[in-house]
Every structure is written in structure tokens, then in C-alpha cells.
Amino acid sequence: MDGPLVNEAVLGRVKGWRPYVEAKLGFRNHWYPALFSRELEEGKPVEATLLGESILINRVHGVARAIRNRCLHRGVKFSRRLECYKPGTITCWYHAFTYDWKDGRLVDIITNPSSALIGKHKLQTYPVIEAQGLVFVFVGHEEPPALAADVPPGFLDADRTIHGKRRVVRSNWRLGVENGFDASHIFIHKGSPLCAGNDIALPLGFAPTQPGTGTRPSIGAPGPIGLYDLLGESAIPVFEGTIGGETVLEGHFGEKRVADNISIWLPGVLKVDPWPQEGMQQFEWYVPVDATTHIYLQTLGRVTASPAEAEAFRQEVDDKWVDLALDGFNDDDVWAREATEEFYADNDRGWVEERLFEADIAIVQWRKLASEHNRGIQRPENL
Amino acid sequence: MDGPLVNEAVLGRVKGWRPYVEAKLGFRNHWYPALFSRELEEGKPVEATLLGESILINRVHGVARAIRNRCLHRGVKFSRRLECYKPGTITCWYHAFTYDWKDGRLVDIITNPSSALIGKHKLQTYPVIEAQGLVFVFVGHEEPPALAADVPPGFLDADRTIHGKRRVVRSNWRLGVENGFDASHIFIHKGSPLCAGNDIALPLGFAPTQPGTGTRPSIGAPGPIGLYDLLGESAIPVFEGTIGGETVLEGHFGEKRVADNISIWLPGVLKVDPWPQEGMQQFEWYVPVDATTHIYLQTLGRVTASPAEAEAFRQEVDDKWVDLALDGFNDDDVWAREATEEFYADNDRGWVEERLFEADIAIVQWRKLASEHNRGIQRPENL
Amino acid sequence: MDGPLVNEAVLGRVKGWRPYVEAKLGFRNHWYPALFSRELEEGKPVEATLLGESILINRVHGVARAIRNRCLHRGVKFSRRLECYKPGTITCWYHAFTYDWKDGRLVDIITNPSSALIGKHKLQTYPVIEAQGLVFVFVGHEEPPALAADVPPGFLDADRTIHGKRRVVRSNWRLGVENGFDASHIFIHKGSPLCAGNDIALPLGFAPTQPGTGTRPSIGAPGPIGLYDLLGESAIPVFEGTIGGETVLEGHFGEKRVADNISIWLPGVLKVDPWPQEGMQQFEWYVPVDATTHIYLQTLGRVTASPAEAEAFRQEVDDKWVDLALDGFNDDDVWAREATEEFYADNDRGWVEERLFEADIAIVQWRKLASEHNRGIQRPENL
């Protein structure tokens, strides 16, 4: 309902990944994690805006449910004043239109129990799946695929324990993806507490040696669809920073070798393996909220052999890795995305005025893959 | 001067009350109360924005006067720094253009007393009438009708004392009118301190029994023009709130019967009689300020027999009814209007995406009546 | 990149000075003072936005340099996190693109020292001249003229000492120029501490006696190009303020005669001589920052005979004249410009709805001169 989302002049000039540039609000018909299962209590709805749609998520008789957070009648948000008079239903605070959480059906109108509308209308509902301690919501109208089609390989492994945090970042979601999958961005981490604190090897950048390579796609059905970075094979890590031949800076020569395997997956989730050390992985999502904001949902994973080991791992993440990695390292990324937002948000000029360099081949290939394999673009008419 | 006020795509889809949807800034050529007489002191101009026009109201030799708050010369607001060097005039702080409050005539320019402009130009003035302790301003260019044409029946009765308060509400004025005249909205008042505090009967809603009725118009010349709600005849009050046949909530079974007679009048004023108890009435205005704000001017009235009785009534309103009714009850309404604003303000989508139900017949009839009988729509070119 | 800067409907109606109305962001290809030399330290870049362009200014090996504050790669601002690893260069905090301050050349990319881009690209640089304690930046792409073409006569005299301050004012730059060059605006200074504190004669306004005169242009090559106000010859100072023949106000009858000679120069700099007293001059710039903001750079000048005398004069400005004149008097001007902004910023309506009077002949002539003699209009495509 808001006029064109994206500058038409810019769209006309983009070659190779126009759908990606159009997807300012994200790709439709995909699964997105909205929050952690531990954040969702029985009968306590939580509001989450995904791809510009305000959604209310609740746990009803133990099952996670999601509905559009907007009464059909006068369009008000239920979340302004949550009212529930019977488990499994939600009643609008204004005229008492009452809906079923399961299918969105208008089951009653308390202020007018004889209304002909009752039973005839349905609020939009969203498929929800809980997995690995996360609540995934399918944003779209199509039949949803299995969750496995939209998460990185290994993420759903039964013996893997996942734990992490989420926060809101003030940049478009694509700047999150591109910062994460961009190997050269590690330059911003040169002073990170993780380097010394975990003794990892961290170069200043990567010099590609074979022009035109860079990634290996993974697009087989039933998915997921993504790209592996091939830095290890096609680039030399830069540990000596030089200007005019003179060494001015050095990378961090640590003992631990990490991040051998970096991959990006639709609809926008990064896997770094191992990270922040051997035996662990980082899976992180950049979930579109609106044009200028995304949810940065960061998780760490490890194979665990028992519930006790799983619990110990979660404790370790909370006690150690949040400070050292999820904050200590990734705060730099959050800062960088927010600092990049201005240029791309200014009438979308960034998409045509940027000047990419060799190391951006991975970003270019991600944009093309996303343009080709997404299941739909979020449009204003869906808002 | 601001491009189209209302989304053209929405206007094209509205059937039945397009002028009403166009009237985002209100209806022109009507009388609006801007403030209370007690707020207007001799020689102390007060700024009020009505229908998007910034107006300066003053008491000059005892008479209320209103002028456009914008110097003809460089367009600055007099109210930025009020300067008056001779009673009955106002001098612009910038180049000392000096105007007469009575007719807006440019009577002098202190910085250039020989200017040819003197006596040749006029600032826009607004007809003003004080009545029942309120200062009414006529916003428009046409010849104003009698004030009685724009206030509810009985309001001007000589033996009626009127007293109240005003505040600014962050919603379009129409959401004020529609909340007030909408009988089913009483659902939001179910916990109001007025129910118990004044022992009134307050149902949860109304179930219309005769489809298609709902209101009785009053459109005879010389006015006022409005609608009476016919709930008493055509609907059953709902005291038992049910979901799926199960009672989940009850209305308030008080002794006092109130609000038998509810009516709405152009240009946007509600009368509730009796209210908040027998012998009293509430008259309340929703005066457009700009596209997203209105002045909520609330008054209570009662027939009084003497000045002493009138004064006692005003004291009673201040001491008791402001807390219990004008705030205690109507704060819920203010909150509801502000919570509804988002949907209608979002590119005017509400007007085409709302889904009205049976009880909204009164609102539909108000929209049609207002579309047909208003004296003009406020347009950007008047701002 | 931001759609039309100026309301097209307004542009279509402006007669006589359309280029001036188009120049919302200022005139291109002119010299503008960005800051004082004393504010620019070696190796400590300062950000300044001029005509909508974010510029980074630095002192490199003693020489003032200016570059575009935006990395060619992903468009981020260097100023977000300044990094310099070798004197004379600046390194982008994100991917370590490294540029030379002198010519903007991309001299290295630390994260990828073998990049083919190195040596092939140039960041925009800006010509810079330091003179009279100010850092002047040439905003444009043309070959810059001598600085003398863009400053008032006498400003660059070798024996003149200049000292002052700068601040940001929340109005378009043209409202700064017009307030300064408008003789009648002195009405706002009637209560200024400078009147009594420095015993100057200050009328309330000026009554032009010869219609159609008002200014004398100075447009000879090589410039500068400007206008002298001819009030002394063509207008009578108004010391008696009257309304309807009755005296209501008086100007300030001081001993000192000041401001005999007032002139305005492209690209927007005022000279008042003498001011605030015999032997001194005020030179002040209104430098466009963006559509609604300008830098108000105020200086006072005096002929001095030795470095010691120059230093004593600077001290006198700091100790006495900032309080009494640059703040005490000009704070009123800042206030007036900000109070005028609303009308002109509202869809540029002011340019067609204003109603000028006789004393505005000087402003009209300035608008025409500026429209005819500017070296270019700042357009969105340059941002």
C-alpha cells in the first residue's frame, strides 16, 4: 500500500540481480526464525514483524501458533491490548471480534453474537514449526516446504544442540547477509577480543588467485539452496597489510584454525564451520523486519550426546561465547551493517553506485542465486 | 500545497462516501469550537490550528477575534514572537507589518510608513462567536450560517450551563467521531471507573435486530444536520458475553440508565443524553487539527436556574465529573482512537480494507450523511 | 538521487529568478569556507557537509586537503571510523581501500593487495585554499577561479586580520542571505544589547524614497560579483515607529554611525562596513549544508599593522565582540531565519506566496543577480 518500495530508476539499471534488489522486504514463501522457543510462553502472545507483516505468535495448548496482528474489522493491532477470554482464542479489544488461533476463523463477536460474519471470515494464519529451540514462521501464501529446505545442512541434526541470542539491527537484511558472507569484511575484526581470547588465526583479508571462481552452489532439490565459499582453494589469506609495499598492519597469528567452511543459504542464513573453535558452528539469520531493520538471530551449535551435555553446552554459550563471540566478535558486524545502511537506503543508490572488487565475487554469486531461486518477493500488497 | 492529501487509488475504490474520505482535514465552512472562553484573555493571543490552518485568536476590547497566523509578507507566524504596539492591532516581529484584528487590514508598516501596500492588503480573518463558554471559529470563505446550524439541538438553550475540558488526540478527527457514535465500542469501557463509581448500566455491545435501520436523520433547514442512533428500538443490549455459547464476560448491571439518546451532528459533534446520569448531557467535538491530530473538546451540560446554580454545576464538573467521566470514561476512547490511527493513516488503506459489521450501520449512515450535507471539503490550496 | 529537489509547480510560477529558487542546495563551482584554519589539525580529518556533499577535510604535511567522505566500494563514510596507517593516505574501515589525500587515487587495498582496481580509480577531491584563517573548499567539477572571485572586496587584503566563529542554523541558506542583506530586518534588533553596549545609531527600518533603485551591482571580471545596498542615497531611516500616525516605538539614537556600506556577494557572503564600529567590518557566509540547514560563518576584520596587533585584535573579538555582536546582535538573525524556514520549506510555497514590499528591492535584485551570475546549480545527481 506504500507506492513502489524500490526506486524504479535504480531497478532499471541493475543487471544480473534485479529480483534481489526488489526484495527490500525479503523473500516470500520461506521459513524464518522469529524468536527462541524459550521466549514463547503458553498464552502470552509475542509480536514480531517479519517482512513488514506484523505477526502475533502464541503458544496454545503447547503448540506455537501465528496470526496476523490486525483485526479484520477496523484494522487495529490485537497487541495494543491483548485480550483472551477463552483459551485458544483471541478477542479484539475494540469490538470483541474473536478468532481461533488454530485457523484464524472468526468464531464469535462478543458485542454482537448474532452477526452474520461469524464463521464466515478468517484472519491470516502462518504455518509455524519449532525446531532446535527456535520458532520458525512461514511467511507467504503458498504451501510450505519442509523446514529442512530453508536451513543450512546439519542445522536440524538430532544430536546437535543450538543456543544463542537475537537482537534488532538497523540495516536492511541484505546488508546483514552480505557482511556475513563477505570474507574480506574480516578486516573490521582485527581488534576483536575473540582473536586473543580464543587464540584464533585471523587474516586481514583474502587475495583471490583464480578470477571468476569463488563459490560452489548447492541447489539440488529438496534444498536447502545455497553457496559455499571457496576461499581456501582460490585465495591467499593476507596476514601482512601493506600500503605502497610497506607493511603497516598485521593479521592475528593464532593457533586455532577456524571458519574453513562458510556457506550462505536462502532465505538469508549463514553457516560458519568450525566457529568459534573446532567442533562448533555458528548459524545466523538476518530476518527482514522492515525496509531498514532486521532481526539478527545468532546461534552456536555443537553435537551433544545427552541432555546433560546439551544443557552444559547451552550454559557454556551463555557464560563464555556470548561475550567472546556473539557480542565480542559480532558487535563489529552489527556496527558495520548499520554504517553501510545510509548509502543503500538513500533511494537505493548503493545498488548501482557501488564498485565491487575481486573478493566480492561471492556476494555477486549470492545475489544471482537468490534472484533465481527465491520463492517470491515480498510486495507492498501483502502488507 | 502538499500534493494530494488522500491516496488516489483509495479514493477510486470508495463507494458511497468518497467526500467523507477526502475530508481528511475536515469539512470547510462550518463552525468549530477552538477553545473555552475562559482560556481567552484580553490582548493575549492564543494559537489554534483548525483544519490545517494556523489561526491566532485574541480578545480585543472584550470581543473574540481570529486572524490567519501568517504574515502576508514573508509568511512567518506572528505567534513565534507576539508583538502588539497598539490595542486592536498586531505587528509582525520581522518587518513590522501591522494588521487590524477586526478586519485583517494592513494598517501600517512600521519599518516603512510610506509603503504603498498600507491599506491595500488584508490578512484572512475568521468569523468568531462565543456561546456557552466556548469560542467558535468559522473556518471557510463562505458567508457563515447561524451557530445553531452547527451545534446539537439544545446545546444553545439559554438555561443550559456548559462546562468541560479539551485536549489533543493523535488520531484523525473521523476516528474520533466514529468511535463516539459507534455503539459497540462500549466494549472498551467494560472496566471503566464510571460503571461502578456512578452505578450505571453498561452492556458489552448491541445486537441489531432489524437489518438496515440503525439511525434516523435530522436534515431539515436551517439545521443542524445529524443522525439519531436508534439502538433502543432496533437492537438488543448484550450483557452476557459468549464465545462458542459459553459465557466468558458480563456487562455492568447498574441501577442508572443512561445514553438513551445518542446523536451525531455536522461538522463532527456528538450528543449523549442523558450522560453520565439523568439530567445531564455530554456534548463533545472532534475538531480537525491536521491529518493525524484532532482537538477533543468535551463538555457536560445541565439546565440551571440561576447563576449560582450554574456556578455550582461548573464546580461539580471540575470536582467530580472530570475524573469520573471526561477522563475516567473517555480516556479509553482517546486510547482507542490513537490505536486505530495507524491503519487508516497508512496510505488511507483503512477506508477500503476495513470490514464493517451489522452494528456499523450507524457509522455508514453518518459517512453518507456527512458526504452529502457538508458545506465543503478542506483542500490543500486553503492551507 | 532524491527526486526533484524543488516543487515543480512552484518553479513553473517563479518569474525572474527561477535558477535561484532551484538552488536549494546552493550554487556549484564556487569557493565556500568550511571551517577555520585553527580547527584543522595535522592528521585529524574533519567532516563537513557542503551543498549536500559530505566532505572530509584534513591537514596533510601542513596542507589542507579535501576528499569525498564516501568509499568508492560500498559507499560507507570514512568518518564513521577514521583509519590511517600511513601519513598522506586514508584507509576505509570496512575493506581497507586506501586512498591518497592529494589526488584521491586508490593506492592500495590492504585486504587484497593484488586487486586490479588499485591505481585505476580515484575518489573525488576538492580544491582547498587557506586564506585569512579560513579553509575554503571549491565545490564543483569545473576549474576553480582565484579565491578573490568569490569573496567580498577587501577581505583578502594582506594587512587585514580576520577572526570569528561558525555555527549551524536550521534554515535554508537563502534565508540567511536574505535576512542579512534585507535592511528592514533591523526591526528585530531593536532590543539588541549591541545598541546600548556599543552606543550605535539603529533605526527601526528604512523608507525608500526612489522607487526602483536600491542597489548598485558589481559584476566586472574577474569578480567578485555582488551588489551594494544604496539605502544611504535612496531611503530615509525610520527612527519613529508609528501606527495610524501615533508614535508607538523608537529606534536607538546612539552616537556611533555604522553599516554605511552593505554588500552581498556570490556565492552568498555579506560585508557590512563599518561594523560593529568604525574601522571594523563584518564578513559573514551562509554556506549550504543541506536543504534545511546552513553553516553561519561569522567573521570580523580590521586592518592591523603587526602580528602583535593582529593577535590583540583576535583577542578583542573573543573577549568582547563575540558576546556583544556575533552572538548578542546576530542571535536575533539566527532566530529569524529559523522562524522563516517553515513557510519556504513547506513545498517551496514561500517563493510564490510571499508578498514583497518596496524595501525588498535589494532582495529582488540579489535574486536576479544570483540567478544570472552563478556558476552552476547544485543538482541531486552530484550528491
Image (cartoon, coloured by chain):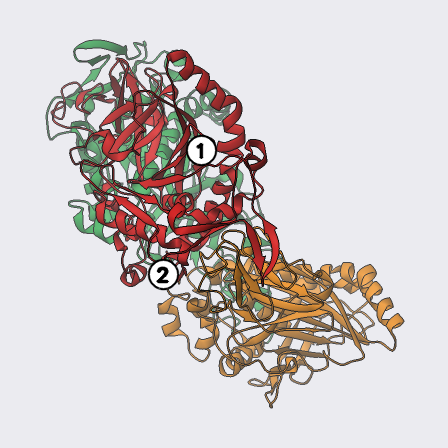
Chain colours: A orange, B red, C green
Which amino acid is tagged 1?
Trp
The crowding category of the residue bearing disc 2, from other C-alpha atoms within 10 Å (few below 14, some 14 to 19, many at least 20), is some
Q: Which sits in the foreground, B103 or C28?
A: B103
Name the residue tied to disc 1: B275
- Residue C59 at what x, y percent from top left? 53, 48
Question: Residue B92: which quarter of the image?
Answer: top left
Name the residue tied to disc 2: B352
Q: Secondary structure at mark 2?
A: helix
Residue at (80% x, 69% y) in the render: A254
Q: Chain of mark 2?
A: B
The crowding category of the residue bearing disc 1, from other C-alpha atoms within 10 Å (few below 14, some 14 to 19, many at least 20), is many
Residue at (12% x, 23% y) in the render: B119
| Relative vertical location of residue C248 with respect to residue A165 in this rendering, above or below | above
Q: Is residue A123 left or right of residue A12?
A: right
In what quadrant of the picture does the N terminus of chain C appear?
bottom left
Dot 1 or dot 2, earlier in sequence? 1
Q: Which sits in the foreground, A62 or A2?
A: A62
Q: Is residue B116 left or right of residue B257?
A: left
Q: Is residue C235 left or right of residue B42?
A: left
